[in-house]
Image: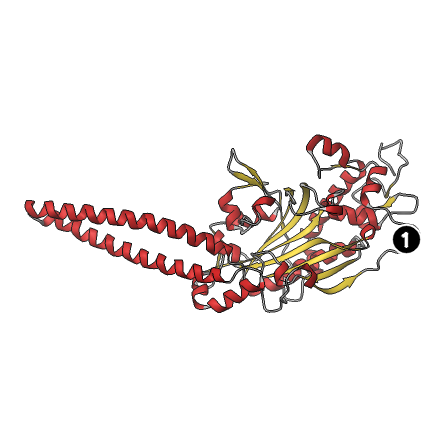
Amino acid sequence: MLDIKFIRENPKKVKQGCKKKQVDPSIVDQVLELDKKRRELIKKIEDLRKEHKDTTSQVMESSSEERTELKIAGAEEKEKIKKDEEQLKIIEKDFNELMLQIPNIPLNDVHEGKDERENKVIRKWGKISKFGFKPKDHIELGKKLDIIDTEKAAQVSGARFAYLKNEAALLEFALVKYAFDVLTSEKILKKIAKKGHSSKPFVPVIPPVIIRPEVYTKMARLSREEEDEKYYLAKDNVYLTGSAEHTLGPIHMNEVIKDLPKRYVGFSTCFRREAGSYGKDTRGILRVHQFDKIEMESFTRPENSLNEQEFFVGIQEYLMQSLEIPYQVVMICTGDMGKPDARQIDIESWIPSQNKYRETNTADLMTDYQSRALNTKFKEKNGKTKLVHMNDATVFAIGRTLIAIIENYQQKDGSIKIPKVLQKYLNFKSISEKKSPLTGYKS
């Protein structure tokens, strides 16, 4: 959330930020009105407590006759305090709910726009594959090669689940191993980082996939608009996470971090209802309810956070280029950004069957929007503590990366070549209908 002091001092700027993100700016006035009532009531309670303390001390020093009157006055004061405290709880509840609805303010270089149609392409990389045949989609190829099965998964689990089988399962773990090798290598990261920016490696993590509601709220990932997307386990009052950064972000909750930057790379299974998606996107493994992802999360000093986001994008581009997947880098407009984002950059990979680029990676700069609620800080040389800035970004959304590989590397005979960079992790260089009698896998 934003700093209430900043909102008090910059209501016009905050309203402009709300408007850019398609949020009703009148919410700022509501917050300020509640903030005023809250502060007045806190002052009133403090004065009453002081008065009650004086009354209590007078009881000990008074005569028996005066003592009775003072006790009655003290009881009345106590009742007033209790009522005001109950009122304060109601006001603070409403205040905190409204505070969470105010979005982060976009950085100056983020352009204003209503939706994804106004996002801007920054650059492109790679040549779009020109096939001498009509390319098939990943669903047809996956079924024919027996590596993706959505039909049986639908019978077992319901619509929009999938079995990854044979080479597809092995290919997933090749992507995981490759990603972790890159992100834990200072030598490789040094090539990607801009001059003067830290090339400190990432700490590998397998994070929890269950999160408490209060922590999810602090991560600004449990707004009313997003609740329909979440899987909620009512018996335990917890949620299944929609991405690894949801539990990587709170890894330093209520801590003062040393040795910034702190960087983590996490692999986890993710769960989303994808309630608003429809049509072609619901076929295959593009938009499923359960999927695996590798995510980056970092904690930096405020002055380094923008360069950190660019570093994350550099890592994403390094990985996609090494896989030789054509892509474009897109600056997301204000209306298409997430509520906690100050700046968002996406990478969209070329999907031949759709004849267009589709999002496979996102890099989000949150500034101190999340760390304020999480109470995650660092210490300056003068001993004062400050809120860290936080970044998160996709390394590989496994399902979508598999789609990009399967469709871009398909051959005329229906086989699929394996990107060279992944071959060292596998015992095959292509996927075809011909089975290998030695391994049982297709080669």
Find disc 1 in the rendering and name its residue.
131
**Quadrant where the C terminus is found in the figure:** top right
In the rendered image, residue 256, in percent from the top left (x then y), is placed at: 48, 54
Dot 1: element: loop
| Label 1 crowd bin: few (<14), some (14–19), many (20+), radius 10 Å | few
Instruction: Residue 31 in the image: state x and y as whole percent.
Output: 43, 59
Asked which quadrant contains residue 391, the reply is: bottom right
Looking at the image, which residue is at 71% across and 39% down?
A: 160
* Quarter location, residue 174: top right
Q: Residue at x 80, y 36 (%)?
A: 166
Q: Residue at x 25, y 56 (%)?
A: 47
Residue 413 located left or right of residue 140: right
Residue 184 left/right relative to 379: right
Please indicate whether residue 129 sits to the left or right of residue 23 in the image.
right
Q: Nearer the viewer, residue 408 or 396?
A: 408
Q: Nearer the viewer, residue 181 or 251?
A: 251
Q: Residue at x 79, y 50 (%)?
A: 404
Query: Is residue 187 in view?
Result: yes
Q: Could you tell me the amino acid type at mark 1?
A: Phe
Where residue 118 sits in the image (x, y, percent)?
68, 63
Q: Nearer the viewer, residue 342 or 425?
A: 342
